[in-house]
Image (cartoon, rainbow, N blue to C red):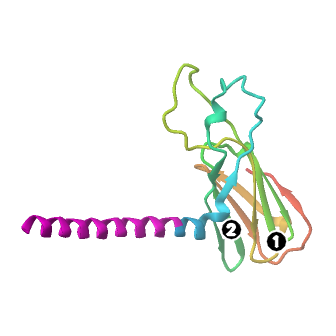
């Protein structure tokens, strides 16, 4: 009888732990989807170009997060996007109305051709992401900087609706 009671207690404890783990996983996915769904970005690869990658790109993911934040101050709308593994010349910014369009390419670089990947979580290729701005901005006075893998676009508020490309400095 004592062994049956012990098994029942173990089963209940295991059930509670599984339920707690499921709730934690569920909460994590819910937060990821609610807070970062717009950061999920598709990277398009040229499937015919395998000359410099040895075909390795085909195994890498084609979706990745370009995490960002949009902040509004008294004077500006500030957009920051994390672009790990990229340089300022790898991205282009265009503003049309109250939408910022970011496009570019994350290039694959390989140190050697005789290696095997065991983890493949980084995406490579061309991408485009659009971010709705909370108000119209002055595109003539917009500035973009790139530092430590983070692109920062500062947009003074109360501008016109005309489109403009911005050079990253």
Task: Count up the numbered dots.
Answer: 2
Task: Give the magenta range.
Answer: 1-29
Question: Which residue, as the protein is rendered here, is positioned at the far top?
Answer: 114
Instruction: Answer whether residue 140 is magenta in the image.
Output: no
Observer able to see residue 75: yes
Residue at image position (72%, 22%) is 51
As rendered, which of 5 and 130 lies closer to the eye? 5
Which corner quadrant of the image does residue 120 belong to? top right
SS state under label 1: loop
Residues packed near mark 2 inside 10 Å, few (<14), some (14 to 19) or many (20 plus): many
Give whichever of discs 2 and 1 has the lower sequence position.
2
Q: Residue 15 falls in which quadrant of the image?
A: bottom left
Query: Is 60 situated left or right of 26 in this image?
Result: right
Q: Which mark is residue 98?
A: 1
Residue 80 in view here = no
Magenta residues: mostly which secondary structure? Answer: helix
Marks 2 and 1: which is nearer the front? 1
Picture layout, residue 138 above or below residue 124: below
Q: CA distance from mark 2 to mark 1?
A: 13 Å
Task: Left or right? Give the position of 132 relative to 28.
Answer: right
Mark 2 — residue?
A: 78
Residue 160 image position (x, y, % from top left): 89, 74
Residue farthest left in this picture = 2
Q: Which element is circle 2 on? A: strand
**Residue lying farthest right?**
162
């Amino acid at each position: 009888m004592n062994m049956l009671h012990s098994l029942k207690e173990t089963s209940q404890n295991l059930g509670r732990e599984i339920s707690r783990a499921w709730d934690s996983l569920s909460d994590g996915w819910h937060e990821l989807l609610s807070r970062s769904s717009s950061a999920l970005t598709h990277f398009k690869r040229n499937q015919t170009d395998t000359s410099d990658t040895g075909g390795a790109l085909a195994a890498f993911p084609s979706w990745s997060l370009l995490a960002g934040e949009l902040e509004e101050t008294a004077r500006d709308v500030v957009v920051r996007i994390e672009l790990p593994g990229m340089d300022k010349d790898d991205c282009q910014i265009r503003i049309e109305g109250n939408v910022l369009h970011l496009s570019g390419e994350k290039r694959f670089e390989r140190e050697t051709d005789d290696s095997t990947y065991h983890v493949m979580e980084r995406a490579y290729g061309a991408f485009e992401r659009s971010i709705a701005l909370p108000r119209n901005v002055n595109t003539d006075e917009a500035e973009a900087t790139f530092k430590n893998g983070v692109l920062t676009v500062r947009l003074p508020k109360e501008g016109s609706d005309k489109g403009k490309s911005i050079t990253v400095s």
